[in-house]
Image (cartoon, rainbow, N blue to C red):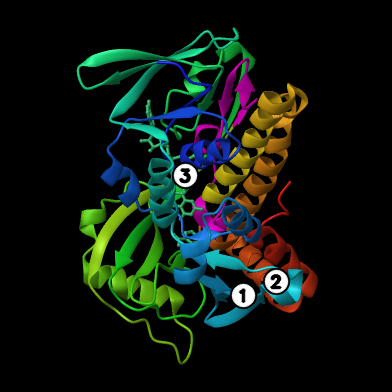
Amino acid sequence: MRTRVGIIGAGPSGLLLSHLLHLWGIESVVLESRERDHVQARQRAGVVEHGVARLLREAGLGERMDREGTTHHGIELRFSGRSHRVDFPGLCGRDVRIWAQTEIVKDLVARRLADGGQILFGARATAVEDIESDRPRVRFVRGQSEQVLECDYVAACDGFHGIGRRSLPPEAVSTFDRLHPFSWLGVLADVAPSCEELVYARHERGFALHSMRSSRVSRLYLQVPNDTDPDAWTQERVWDELAERMAVPGWELRRGPITAKSLIPMRSFVTEPMSHGRLYLAGDAAHIVPPTGAKGLNLALHDVALLARGLRAWYTRRETGPLEAYSDTALRRVWRAQHFSHWMTTLLHTHGDAFDHRLQLAHLEFLASSRAASAQLAENYTGLPHV
Ligand code: FAS
Ligand code: PHB
């Protein structure tokens, strides 16, 4: 099998890359180890940055997002029994869309298949070879057969556990890794959200986040120890803990049936560089951020937009500059997002000693009283302008 760009992974990164290349007449094949239903159902991110929403619209993928998603003009910080709203337009002139990653993936799969795109589900890449030549190839297994995909370029969009990152020469790579001493217990519930905008709560018992998927479905998270067994959390215990951590006068948390529960580790990870020879990494294959800053999905789509432009420059103008600059350009945004996500995570999660807790509260008081401090949060949360 032969194509121009071999893409490993049909998550948001791989699918958007294949779609953008198609728009510019560049052929690709996507290899995805799981089946379509699984890929489309995976509960992941919920917030789309201002610039990424525009990117999706420009790529012809914004229609359902604009019809069914919602615009949020701020978030609410809660601490010490009080609430502070961060007004995005007032502080930085931008907003965010609440639009689940599952919906972005569904639209991308449908669009690629409607456009005749090749997504091979159930095709697990097992090796990436000859990346220092101009004819790299991907070995993959599908059903009982082992096959080879020959291509000009390989894009590893295969997430944190994929083979892409492991296919870079170890001597050429530096990795930066930090596993935080707490995780999130994420729940999906069939109940209307109890807030208009996302609530990020810092409480002595731990962090809590109230997000949503629609007017009838809420998405909530609780800081828990890393060795937590989600099954040890009954529905009643989850709701009681969320209510206590997010309590402010005059507010009540609506309860309803919890339909999904999962443990999400809090990790900060970066691979440098994000390319070698004809192999390019994008998204979680190259970096992981703790979800506190809602950056993971957005970073992935920024990577892909950059990589697609580099491949377009090569195929249409035989320009190598944008591809050569891909890793350095992407990493500038990656480290900005790493810093912001780490800052939000250490600000809001209770860990460390009493001194650390007092520092957190002093910082939150400063955020609530200083326009400059809140503007820094608003600028980062709504996303840096698209490069
Ligand atoms: P993905 O991991 O989404 O996709 C990689 C794809 O590659 C998968 O479909 C996988 O099956 C496939 N694959 C892997 N190995 C393969 C192989 N060898 N051959 C073929 N296919 C292979 N971000 C936020 O902003 N907010 C959140 O709340 C949030 N919650 C998250 C919860 C969880 C449990 C996880 C794991 C991540 C969360 N994230 C969140 C981050 C998440 O949204 C990622 O940033 C996003 O999925 C990145 O997309 P991709 O880079 O496409 O990687
Ligand atoms: C989500 O809706 O899943 C979500 C929103 C904001 C975050 C993390 C997760 O910071």
Q: Is mark 3 within 8 Å of ligand 1?
A: yes
Asked which quadrant contains residue 122, the reply is top left
Q: Amino acid at mark 2?
A: Leu
> Label 2 belongs to which residue?
367
Q: Is residue 13 left or right of residue 384?
A: left
Q: Give whichever of discs 1 and 3 has the lower sequence position.
A: 3
Q: In this rendering, which labeled residue sits more in front, label 1 or label 2?
A: 1
Q: Is residue 36 above or below residue 374?
A: above
Residue 21 location in percent, x, y? 57, 35
Q: Amino acid at mark 1?
A: His
The numbered dot on residue 227 is none
Kindly state the secondary structure of the residue where label 3 is placed: helix
Residue 6 location in percent, x, y? 48, 24
Label 1 CA crowd tier, 10 Å (few <14, some 14–19, many 20+): many
Residue 298 location in percent, x, y? 57, 50
The numbered dot on residue 73 is 1
Q: Quadrant of ligand 1?
A: top left
Residue 77 location in percent, x, y? 57, 73
| Front-lying residue, 139 or 372 | 139
C-alpha span from label 2 to label 3? 33 Å
Q: Give whichever of discs 1 and 2 has the lower sequence position.
A: 1
